[in-house]
Image (spheres, helix red, strand yellow):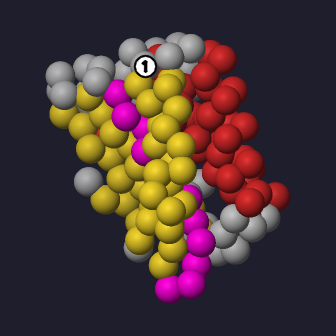
Amino acid sequence: MSAAGGTAARLPILSDADLSLVRQRVRAKAQELGFGLVQQTKLVTAASELARNTLVHGGGGEMEMTEVTQTGRHGLRLSFIDSGPGLADVEQALTDGYTTGNGLGMGLGGARRLVHEFTIDTAPQRGTTVTIVAWASTPVDSPVVRR
């Protein structure tokens, strides 16, 4: 996988208004790259959940959006980066129904199911970076999970 044009955007995630901007920018870039409507919706939903986690659980941070290519395919790599408390148990955090807040506990695991690749880098008191990759015109069936 290679970055097609460097980092396309770096957006702060510091307020609810920033969540809306993240959704808009991800959708616009996905449309530009030829993602179908269903693929756009899946990617925007995953980005929205991860951006909200960055804001609520990480105390704010940023999203990096990069256009990537691999063997003729175009995709988007999104990294959600915070300097918050980090996750002590990644498997537990990915379990549907687990939450440390007031939500349903579906966001992190749900986001993982909506994309082709999902990577989480975290440790207590070190912050969390969640990186996802989605490819245009490729159905999502079983995402690759890396740690």
**Amino acid type at mark 1:** Gly
Residue 42, percent across and down?
Answer: 68, 52
Seen from the viewer's position, the closer of residues 47 and 62 is: 62
Residue pointed to by mark 1: 60
- Around disc 1, counting alpha carbons within 10 Å, would you say few (fewer than 14), some (14 to 19), or many (20 or more)? many
Tell me, yes or no, whether the highlighted magenta stretch contains residue 73: yes
Seen from the viewer's position, the closer of residues 47 and 65 is: 65
- State whether residue 93 is above or below residue 20: below
Q: Is residue 94 left or right of residue 104?
A: left
Q: Is residue 107 left or right of residue 86?
A: right
Residue 49: name its quadrant: top right
- State whether residue 36 is above or below residue 41: below
Identify the residue shown where x is 30% and y is 34%.
128
Please state the extent of the stretch shown in magenta in the rendering: 71-82
* Mark count: 1
Identify the residue shown where x is 24% and y is 37%.
122
Residue 5, percent across and down?
Answer: 50, 62
Q: Is residue 136 left or right of residue 88?
A: right
Seen from the viewer's position, the closer of residues 143 and 125 is: 125
For the N terminus, the quadrant is bottom left
Residue sitting farthest toward the front? 5
Tell me, yes or no, whether the highlighted magenta stretch contains residue 45: no
Q: Is residue 67 visible?
A: yes
Residue 79, percent across and down?
Answer: 43, 45
Secondary structure at badge 1 equals loop
Identify the residue shown where x is 55% and y is 20%.
103
Q: Is residue 93 visible?
A: no
Identify the residue shown where x is 79% and y is 64%.
36
Residue 13, percent across and down?
Answer: 51, 24
Residue sitting farthest toward the bottom? 71
Magenta segment's dominant SS is: strand
- State whether residue 16 is above or below residue 38: above
